[in-house]
Image: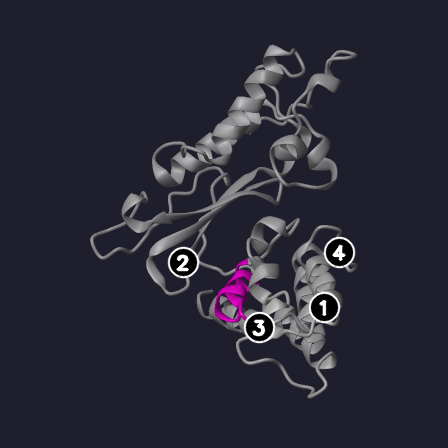
């Protein structure tokens, strides 16, 4: 991968650039960087490595469209990278969908931040053998194939299995600990899943009817897309989440099938697949 420095747009041209924050739900420095042609080419290569072609509606298509418009506006040049994608690369990961052996959850990252996520069928994947097993053809560190479960995926799984339960203070504490473990940010991130969980706890306290309360499924839907940065669940992450949930539960225990139990299960699964 070229290590050339990103070119600075001519004065006035940078303001016209389509930036990552305009296209994807990303935060920080990446959100302010223009989408460049070589960034899009990296993502196309990552998708093609795994699927044999760029995906319709995938991150590469969105990046190529934005980069083409930026090039037409002279905000970027044809052979240009943006700084963070150049330095940190792009990644395409796949994980099994719990309870759906024929489906895989695909997550695409730019500079460590998730930009696209969708489900694909095993039959449509590149590299499957007759038994449905997969192999990975990883080139240049651009494409990543993993069966590890991320914290965000564990939160989404909780939303599916325990989604009808109203959000309680112990849930919100566990979700905040999980998000902090994934992002490395100790506080509550505005617009994140922990912020939504805390808001649900406050509103639920004023609602009498159980059916009207905000449920875990409402808060944890699309958790992987709403977490600014995701990571594989580890034993240390699970211990942090378990402690948070227990401390905020009057019974000093975790909820069966709740956030802590699911993150712990994900961590155990990841250890076994190492």
- Specify few, some or many for label 1: CA neighbours under 10 Å numbering under 14, 14-19, or 20 or more: many
Q: CA distance from mark 2 to mark 3?
A: 25 Å
User: Which one is nearer the viewer's eye here, 270 or 250?
Assistant: 250
The residue at 49%/66% (across/down) is 270
Residue, disc 4: 185
Mark 3 sits on what residue? Answer: 165
Which-is-in-front pick, marks 3 and 4?
3
Q: Is residue 71 magenta?
A: no
Q: In this image, 171 relative to 263: left or right? A: right
| Residue 40 vertical placement versus 152 (above, below) | above
User: Going by the image, does 104 lie left or right of 194?
Assistant: left
Magenta: predominant secondary structure element? helix
Q: Which residue is rendered at x = 57% and y = 23% of the image?
A: 66
Q: Which residues are magenta?
A: 153-164
Q: Nearer the viewer, mark 2 or mark 3?
A: 3
Q: Are marks 3 and 1 in contact (CB under 8 Å)?
A: no
The mark found on residue 96 in the picture is 2
Residue 201 - label: 1
Image location of residue 189, percent across then percent down: 75, 53
User: At 66% across and 49% down in the image, what residue appears?
Assistant: 228
Q: Residue 34 occupies which quadrant of the picture?
A: top right
The picture places residue 135, in percent across and down from the top left corner, at 34, 50
| Marks 4 & 2, CB-CB < 8 Å contact | no
Residue 93 position within the rendered picture, expressed as x and y whole percent measured from the top left: 47, 48
Quadrant where the N terminus lies?
A: top right
Real-space CA distance between mark 1 and mark 4, rounded to the nearest whole angstrom: 21 Å
Look at the picture and state if 125 lies above or below 270: above
């Amino acid at each position: 991968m070229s290590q050339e420095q990103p070119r600075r747009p001519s004065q006035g041209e940078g303001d016209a650039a389509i930036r990552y924050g305009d296209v994807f739900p990303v935060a920080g420095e990446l959100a302010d960087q223009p989408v460049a042609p070589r960034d899009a080419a990296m993502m196309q290569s990552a998708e093609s490595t795994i699927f044999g072609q760029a995906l319709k509606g995938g991150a590469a298509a969105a990046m190529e469209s934005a980069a083409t418009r930026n090039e037409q506006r002279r905000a970027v040049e044809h052979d240009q990278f943006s700084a963070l994608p150049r330095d940190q690369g792009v990644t395409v990961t796949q994980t099994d969908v719990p309870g759906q052996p024929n489906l895989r959850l695909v997550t695409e990252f730019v500079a460590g931040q998730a930009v696209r996520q969708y489900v694909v069928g095993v039959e449509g994947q590149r590299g499957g053998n007759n038994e449905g097993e997969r192999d990975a053809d990883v080139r240049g560190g651009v494409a990543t194939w993993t069966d590890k479960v991320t914290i965000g995926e564990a939160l989404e799984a909780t939303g599916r299995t325990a989604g009808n339960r109203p959000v309680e203070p112990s849930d919100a504490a566990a979700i905040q600990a999980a998000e902090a473990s994934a992002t490395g940010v100790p506080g509550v991130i505005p617009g994140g899943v922990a912020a939504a969980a805390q808001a649900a706890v406050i509103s639920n306290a004023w609602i009498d009817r159980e059916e009207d309360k905000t449920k875990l499924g409402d808060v944890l839907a699309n958790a992987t897309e709403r977490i600014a940065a995701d990571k594989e669940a580890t034993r240390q992450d699970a211990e942090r989440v378990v402690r948070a949930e227990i401390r905020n539960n009057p019974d000093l225990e975790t909820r069966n099938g709740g956030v802590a139990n699911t993150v712990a299960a994900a961590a155990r699964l990841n250890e076994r697949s190492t």
